[in-house]
């Protein structure tokens, strides 16, 4: 018997035949029995680089192609004032309200009506994800703020209040979640140079570059806030007094039919969307055997993030899994281990965070002080974390060497943090620590501290998760939220464990004294110098 899902799929196939160029080597498959909804499989063996289908940019849905731009909005002026998320959310809501009249009807009917991404999890479900830091990034407040911005004011300006009258906050979350898990960032028409390049530029190098840029196909609507915030910092206010957003039509957030029917897998990805001047082309990036599923990539996400954005997990682990440690755990560790006053440690961390010298030294754009640090499943520990722990360890060991000097330096620095002796001392220490790490060397205490910080984080995981760490991850019988949460936690725990086990293996370990003497020698030299100066002046 044909159910509604199948009826919708049949209508969708017809719509695709009428609107896309299909190479005839793939078909839509009902994968509900494996909890994957619709997917795409190969109907014959496919070679690497073979085209699977192509869609013209006119047929993707975005603020330039949607009929919303022409209801009352003069050629999309209002829509262009919004950020990419807001614009596409309104276009999708409007096209859906048109029913049969939308030219995307056959496609729109395939979009999800039920969701599993984290914004839809209740408190009890979310509790099962503790202590994952993904819980800090669900983004409900940001989505609510976006809703309040658009409804009713902007919708009224666009002249579609009646059409969108049923879009309440719950419905808005659904539309935003659809965009989060289905949309692509497509190069817009505004960039002539790129179009020209696209026309002549069928050369492989250029294609590869474009593919690389567009790898992260589906992104994140919480980031729309960042996008706006960043822009607004440098933009003027608009006439209405609202914060202005300069529309950048180089990239257009878009719904791309059929490209979004592909499921994703970080380990099995075998196809990718490539961008040409007029068309978007899905190509195989590996040979695909007849009957195999065609998988895209949604970006280099760990399971926690895949769950947050897309509402599923890779049961045997994402290629990009990591565990996280909050800065506050690291700070508390140093406060208790080295009996440093909380206020003093916070001051030191602030000076490190604001240090221009450190930025110059590391050659990085961002500070080594971040809210949390990632620990990868292959045992990779981020250099920012290594540097912070090496620096804090060294500072705390110097404190033990000369407590009186330390207290005095902190006291003076509290009154004048910038340009103080403490900040000069931190810069000097940074240089010594950086030189050591560059040579893959750490000290005994740094090694011990990293191990103990990782242990503290590992301890926060529930006992059931700890017991699973030695076991291979398998696809569970019940693929419910509880099982997904468990997979996320095991993947994080395994990654943290791998870093504890493997993370420092390539480092040579030396005694602390070698580093500390070196740092303190400069301090003594400076002290001697200033005493001499005082004697000469006196
Ligand atoms: C872009 S859509 C892919 C097509 C989708 N399966 C459908 O039926 O329309 C993304 C959604 O597909 C599902 N999905 C994608 N990859 C998956 C996978 N490897 N396992 C389970 N579900 C997956 C998730 O629900 C995700 O939010």
Image (cartoon, rainbow, N blue to C red):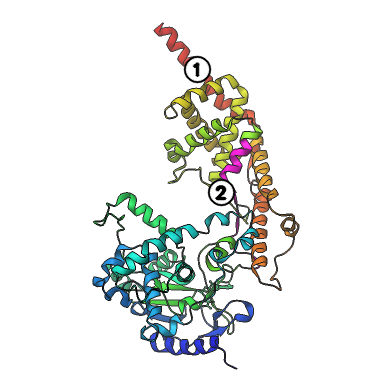
Q: Percent from the top left, x then y, of residue 54?
A: 41, 81
Q: Which mark is residue 527?
A: 1
Query: Which of the two discs, 2 and 1, labels the residue nearer the N terminus?
Result: 2
The answer to whether residue 262 of the structure is visible from this angle is yes
Q: Percent from the top left, x then y, of residue 95?
A: 38, 78
Q: Percent from the top left, x then y, of residue 68?
A: 32, 75
Number of other residues with Cα within 10 Å of mark 2, as a class: few under 14, some 14 to 19, many 20 or more: many
Q: Quadrant of residue 30?
A: bottom right
The residues colored magenta run: 314-334
Number of other residues with Cα within 10 Å of mark 1, as a class: few under 14, some 14 to 19, many 20 or more: few
Instruction: Determine which residue is flagged by label 2.
Output: 373
Say which of 66 and 175 sits in front. Answer: 175
Q: Quadrant of residue 121?
A: bottom right
Say which of 202 and 384 sits in front. Answer: 384
Q: Residue at x 45, y 61 (%)?
A: 144
For label 2, being within 8 Å of ligand 1 is answered no
Q: Residue at x 36, y 84 (%)?
A: 103
**The stretch drawn in magenta includes residue 52:** no
Please tell me whether mark 2 sits on a helix, a strand or a loop.
Answer: strand
Quadrant holding ligand 1?
A: bottom right
Say which of 276 and 12 sits in front. Answer: 12
Which residue is situated farthest in the bottom direction here?
A: 1
Q: Which mark is residue 168?
A: none
Q: Residue at x 44, y 58 (%)?
A: 223
Screen quadrant of the C terminus: top left
């Amino acid at each position: 018997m044909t159910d509604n899902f199948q009826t919708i799929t049949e209508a969708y196939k017809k719509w695709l035949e009428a609107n896309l160029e299909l190479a005839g080597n793939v078909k839509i498959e009902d994968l509900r029995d494996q909890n994957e909804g619709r997917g795409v499989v190969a109907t014959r063996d496919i070679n690497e680089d073979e085209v699977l289908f192509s869609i013209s940019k006119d047929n993707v849905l975005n603020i330039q192609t949607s009929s919303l731009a022409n209801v009352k909005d003069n050629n999309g002026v209002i829509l262009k004032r919004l950020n990419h998320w807001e614009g596409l959310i309104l276009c999708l809501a409007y096209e859906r309200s048109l029913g049969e009249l939308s030219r995307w009807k056959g496609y729109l009917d395939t979009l999800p009506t039920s969701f599993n991404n984290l914004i839809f999890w209740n408190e009890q479900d979310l509790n099962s994800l503790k202590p994952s830091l993904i819980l800090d990034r669900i983004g409900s407040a940001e989505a609510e703020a976006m809703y309040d911005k658009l409804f009713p004011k902007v919708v009224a300006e666009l002249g579609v209040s009646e059409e969108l009258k049923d879009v309440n906050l719950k419905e808005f979350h659904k539309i935003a979640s659809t965009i989060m898990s289905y949309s692509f960032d497509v190069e817009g028409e505004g960039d002539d140079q790129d179009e020209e390049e696209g026309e002549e530029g069928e050369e492989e190098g250029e294609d590869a570059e474009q593919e690389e840029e567009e790898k992260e196909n589906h992104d994140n609507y919480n980031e729309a806030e960042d996008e706006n915030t960043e822009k607004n910092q440098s933009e003027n206010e608009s006439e209405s007094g609202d914060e202005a957003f300069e529309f950048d039509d180089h990239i257009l957030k878009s719904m791309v039919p059929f490209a979004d029917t592909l499921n994703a897998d970080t380990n099995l990805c075998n196809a990718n969307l490539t961008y040409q001047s007029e068309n978007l082309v899905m190509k195989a990036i590996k040979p695909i055997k007849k009957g195999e599923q065609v998988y895209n990539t949604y970006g280099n996400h760990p399971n926690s993030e895949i769950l947050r954005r897309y509402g599923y997990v890779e049961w045997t682990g994402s290629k990009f899994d990591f565990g996280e440690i909050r800065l506050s755990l690291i700070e508390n560790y140093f406060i208790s281990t080295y009996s440093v006053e909380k206020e003093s440690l916070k001051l030191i961390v602030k000076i490190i965070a604001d240090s221009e010298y450190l930025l110059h030294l590391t050659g990085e754009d961002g500070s080594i002080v971040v809210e949390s640090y990632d620990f990868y499943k292959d045992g990779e520990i981020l250099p920012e974390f290594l540097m912070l722990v090496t620096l804090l360890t060294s500072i705390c060991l110097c404190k033990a060497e000369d407590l009186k000097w330390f207290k005095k330096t902190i006291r003076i620095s509290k009154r004048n943090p910038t340009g103080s002796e403490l900040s000069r001392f931190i810069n000097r220490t940074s240089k010594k620590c950086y030189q050591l790490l560059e040579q893959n060397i750490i000290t005994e205490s740094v090694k011990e501290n990293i191990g103990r910080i990782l242990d503290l984080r590992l301890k926060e995981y529930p006992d059931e998760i700890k017991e699973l760490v030695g076991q291979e991850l398998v696809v569970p019988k019940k693929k419910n939220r509880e099982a997904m949460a468990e997979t996320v936690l095991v993947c994080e725990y395994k990654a943290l464990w791998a870093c504890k086990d493997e993370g420092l293996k390539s480092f040579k370990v030396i005694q602390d004294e070698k580093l500390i003497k070196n740092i303190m020698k400069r301090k003594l030299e400076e002290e001697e110098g200033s005493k001499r100066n005082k004697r000469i002046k006196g």
